[in-house]
Image: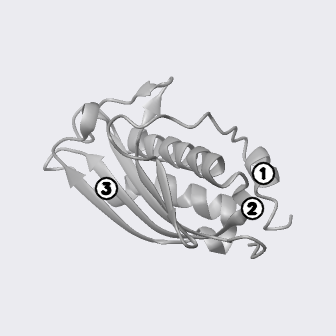
Amino acid sequence: MDRHDIYAKLEECGIALPNMGAPAAAYAMCVQSGNVAYLSGHLAKKDGKVWVGKLGATLSADDGITAARSVAIDLLATLHTHLGDLNRVKRIVKLTSVVNSTAEFTGQHLVTNGASELFAEVFGESGKHARSAFGVAQIPLGACVEIELIVEVACGSDRA
């Protein structure tokens, strides 16, 4: 498969992009400066609602991995809406993951793999990125995972 046929790859992976969510406060979901798109933090959702929980207390690492993967799909939906074509993605540059977790939970990096592995699966080498994963006492609305993304995109005739 051609690396540039991202939509065929999504279909092959059984991924259907949802509609882009709306911001929960006074910010934009995605802002582009030059050839870099900055995606605001997206909260994990389950059955269309914020996925509430704390890793190490009410949720397992496997739940967190699934939650992070769902966030990555939502990030792709936002990027698709912003760019109009995911084939314009040149590289996933940086992913920052915030995990709502107990002080004893130390698997934030494993939870974040749910998103990182999806981007590598969809974009191949261009999906491998720098990243940070943090554990925090709370995330807005009680969400279990929040992820933000920085993406290099092709501008104008400069195709990926």
Percent position (x, y) of residue 138?
19, 41
Q: Quadrant of residue 148?
A: bottom left
Percent position (x, y) of residue 98?
30, 52
Q: Is residue 120 left or right of residue 31?
A: right
Residues at marks 3 and 2 touching, judged by CB atoms closer than 8 Å: no
Q: Secondary structure at mark 2?
A: helix
Residue drawn at point x = 17 percent, y = 44 percent = 102
Q: Earlier in the sequence, mark 3 or mark 1?
A: 1
Q: Secondary structure at mark 3?
A: helix
**Which residue, given by chain and number where applicable, does mark 1 sit on?**
7
Q: Using the rendered image of the protein, determine whether residue 54 is visible from the camera's viewpoint.
A: no
Between circles 3 and 1, the one closer to the viewer is 1
**Which residue, given by chain and number where applicable, does mark 2 sit on?**
87
Residue drawn at point x = 56 percent, y = 71 percent = 128
Residue type for callout 1: Tyr
**Which residue, given by chain and number where applicable, does mark 3 sit on?**
108
Nearer to me, 73 or 78: 78
Residue type for callout 3: Gln
Q: Earlier in the sequence, mark 3 or mark 2?
A: 2
Residues at marks 3 and 1 touching, judged by CB atoms closer than 8 Å: no
Neighbor class of circle 1 (other Cα within 10 Å; few <14, some 14-19, many 20+) is some
- Whole-number angstrom distance, CA of label 3 to CA of label 2: 30 Å
Between circles 3 and 2, the one closer to the viewer is 2
Residue found at the very far right of the displayed protein:
1
Residue drawn at point x = 46 percent, y = 60 percent = 149
